[in-house]
Image (cartoon, rainbow, N blue to C red):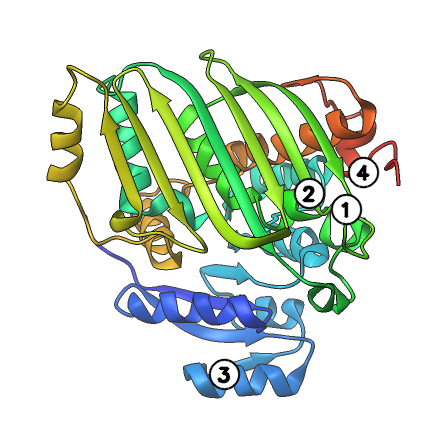
């Protein structure tokens, strides 16, 4: 398949933008970083100098009119993700957006309508889907080699002190969209959903236990999936021993990963059930060096675009993950289980993740 070299731009030159620039440099033969945008001109110029970016803008509209890249990476604070992505889509430019991709399902549905109208693609940065361990797990599970999945555990137990939340947009519903559910655990439960498929119902709690924030600082959910799998999901920024951990108990094996902000194959373990030792052998035979970082997702994006297809983690997959987050909040704040599809356009949790309000 012929490969195209894509002209790319980054909007927002804060910390995560450097991970994007590093990933783009790793695929220099497939991508050229031609411009950056930031409302802080000094920070933009410093970023451009570090990564040898030829053009600097203070406004996305000016970039779109002047440079019009093939792919734009949105790396700004969450409140601006949807508005900036909407500009890109209306201009017919493919956009890759950091998490959370929007602050609500309503915003995401507006982006979907814009994508359909222009034909431009939208994708969310959920890079943990693309490490070799996750890819191998999905392939083996889909082929039935692990048997049925029976139960799963998904824990994002991180620690963020009060100083972390002194950044004005953090810990506020109107600018971050939520607490650790939206801003931290979303990576892990997106990976969970990518393995287990459609979820069916969520029963959850959320609390503000220690941090001076408007949002929750911890949440927990019991989840049932369409295939019958039951799972627990915990999201925290209160946990001194930090870990990101997923466990899948299949009929034929337990598959686990524990890491913090990214995994390699060395972080995965597989324990076969009696009589099914072959699954462990198969797992070990397909080891790879692909880590769960931005380069892996970018490679998948370019492969899809080269083939004339939509990039992975597009609007359908993104909406499933965002709907799960909305359901978790809805269940936590109403005290009722929430089923998939229950949060329609008229539901209070469709337009904001704190819907009917918090108990604190």
- Say whether marks 1 and 2 touch (CB < 8 Å): yes
User: Which residue is the site of mark 3?
Assistant: 48
Compared to residue 311, the image places residue 109 above or below, namely: above
Question: Disc 4 and disc 2: Cα gap in Å?
Answer: 14 Å
Q: Which mark is residue 218?
A: 2
Q: Residue furthest front?
A: 241
Label 2 secondary element: strand
Local packing at callout 4 (Cα closer than 10 Å; few below 14, some 14-19, many 20+) is many
Question: Disc 4 and disc 3: Cα gap in Å?
Answer: 38 Å
Label 4 secondary element: loop
Where residue 137 sits in the image (x, y, percent)?
29, 32
Where residue 91 sits in the image (x, y, percent)?
59, 55
Rendered residue at 45%/81% (across/down):
53
Horizontal side, residue 304 vs residue 84: left or right = left
Which corner quadrant of the image does residue 5 belong to? bottom left
Local packing at callout 3 (Cα closer than 10 Å; few below 14, some 14-19, many 20+) is many
Marks 4, 2: nearer the viewer: 2
Question: Disc 1 and disc 2: Cα gap in Å?
Answer: 7 Å
The C terminus: image quadrant: top right
Compared to residue 192, the image places residue 296 above or below, namely: below
Where residue 324 sits in the image (x, y, percent)?
61, 30
Local packing at callout 2 (Cα closer than 10 Å; few below 14, some 14-19, many 20+) is many
Marks 1, 4: nearer the viewer: 1
Q: Which mark is residue 209?
A: 1
Compared to residue 74, the image places residue 123 above or below, namely: above
Marks 1, 3: nearer the viewer: 1
Which corner quadrant of the image does residue 319 belong to? top right
- Say whether marks 1 and 4 touch (CB < 8 Å): no
* Of residues 29 and 63, the one drawn nearer to the viewer in this rendering: 29
Rendered residue at 82%/24% (across/down):
334
Which corner quadrant of the image does residue 58 belong to? bottom right
Q: Which is more N-terminal, label 3 or label 4? A: 3
């Amino acid at each position: 398949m012929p490969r195209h070299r894509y002209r790319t731009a980054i909007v927002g030159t804060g910390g995560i933008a450097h991970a994007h620039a590093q990933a783009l440099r790793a695929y220099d033969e497939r991508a050229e970083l031609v411009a950056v945008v930031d409302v802080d001109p000094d920070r933009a110029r410093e970023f451009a100098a570090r990564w040898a970016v030829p053009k600097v803008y203070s406004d996305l509209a000016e970039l779109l009119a002047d440079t019009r890249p093939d792919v734009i990476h949105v790396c700004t604070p969450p409140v601006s993700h949807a508005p900036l992505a909407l500009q890109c889509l209306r201009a017919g430019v493919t956009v890759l957006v950091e998490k959370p991709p929007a602050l609500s399902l309503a915003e995401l549905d507006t982006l979907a309508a814009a994508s359909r109208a222009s034909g431009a693609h939208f994708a969310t940065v959920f890079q943990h889907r693309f490490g070799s361990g996750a890819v191998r797990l999905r392939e083996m599970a889909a082929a039935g080699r692990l048997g049925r999945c029976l139960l799963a555990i998904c824990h994002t137990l991180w620690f963020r002190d009060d100083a972390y939340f002194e950044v004005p947009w953090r810990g506020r519903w109107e600018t971050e969209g939520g607490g650790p559910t939206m801003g931290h655990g979303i990576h892990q439960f997106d990976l969970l959903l990518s393995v287990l498929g459609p979820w069916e119902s969520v029963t959850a709690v959320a609390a503000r236990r220690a941090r001076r924030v408007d949002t929750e600082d911890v949440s927990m959910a019991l989840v049932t999936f369409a295939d019958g799998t039951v799972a627990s999901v915990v999201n925290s920024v209160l946990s001194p021993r930090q870990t990101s951990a997923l466990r899948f108990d299949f009929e034929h094996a337990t598959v686990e990963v524990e890491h913090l902000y990214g995994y390699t194959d060395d972080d995965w373990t597989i324990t076969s059930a009696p009589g099914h030792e072959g699954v462990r052998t198969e797992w070990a035979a397909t080891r790879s060096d692909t880590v769960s970082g931005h380069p892996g997702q970018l490679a998948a994006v370019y492969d899809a675009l080269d083939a004339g297809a939509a990039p992975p983690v597009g609007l359908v997959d993104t909406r499933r993950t965002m709907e799960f987050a909305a359901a978790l909040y809805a269940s936590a704040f109403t005290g009722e289980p929430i089923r998939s599809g229950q949060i329609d356009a008229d539901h209070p949790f469709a337009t904001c993740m704190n819907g009917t309000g918090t108990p604190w």
